[in-house]
Amino acid sequence: MKVNIHEAKTNFSKLVDRAEAGEEIIIARSGKAVAKLIGLDPAKVLREPGSAKSDAIFVAEDFDAPLPEDLLRDFHS
């Protein structure tokens, strides 16, 4: 949808509602597009502290041990 600046100022709340619903609003000055009003992506779900409790993950005792020579050779090739 394309609207001029005067119309955008007059109907700003309605245009924001439309953008929030997924419509892209182009704002024009003297018929030339100068801005775009778009909705934002919904807020991401916040992570919940403690979601990786000790029984949910496993870390081997040697997780930080040096890699075997054959893997190192392949990595550096």
Image: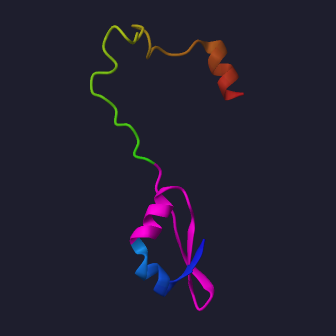
Colour theme: rainbow
Residue 32, located in which quarter of the rendered image? bottom right
Left or right for 13, reference 21: left
Instruction: Please name the residue shown 46% across and 58% down the image.
Output: 20
Could you say which is closer to the camera, residue 47 or residue 66? 47
Left or right for 77, reference 14: right
Percent from the top left, x then y, of residue 57?
A: 39, 12
Percent from the top left, x then y, of residue 27?
A: 54, 78
Q: Is residue 5 magenta?
A: no
Instruction: Please name the residue shown 50% across and 16% down the image.
Output: 66
Percent from the top left, x then y, of residue 76?
A: 67, 28
Instruction: Please name the residue shown 43% across and 9% down the image.
Output: 62
* In the depicted structure, whether residue 34 falls above or below residue 54: below
The quadrant the N terminus occupies is bottom right
The quadrant the C terminus occupies is top right
Could you say which is closer to the camera, residue 6 or residue 34? 6
Direction bottom: furthest residue: 30
* In the depicted structure, whether residue 1 falls above or below residue 74: below
How many numbered marks are there?
A: 0
* In the depicted structure, whether residue 62 falls above or below residue 11: above
Left or right for 8, reference 71: left
Instruction: Please name the residue shown 47% across and 50% down the image.
Output: 41
Direction right: furthest residue: 77
* In the depicted structure, whether residue 44 falls above or below residue 49: below
Left or right for 64, reference 2: left
Percent from the top left, x then y, of residue 2?
A: 60, 76
Could you say which is closer to the camera, residue 39 or residue 48? 39
Could you say which is closer to the camera, residue 12 or residue 34? 12
Q: Which residues are magenta?
A: 13-41
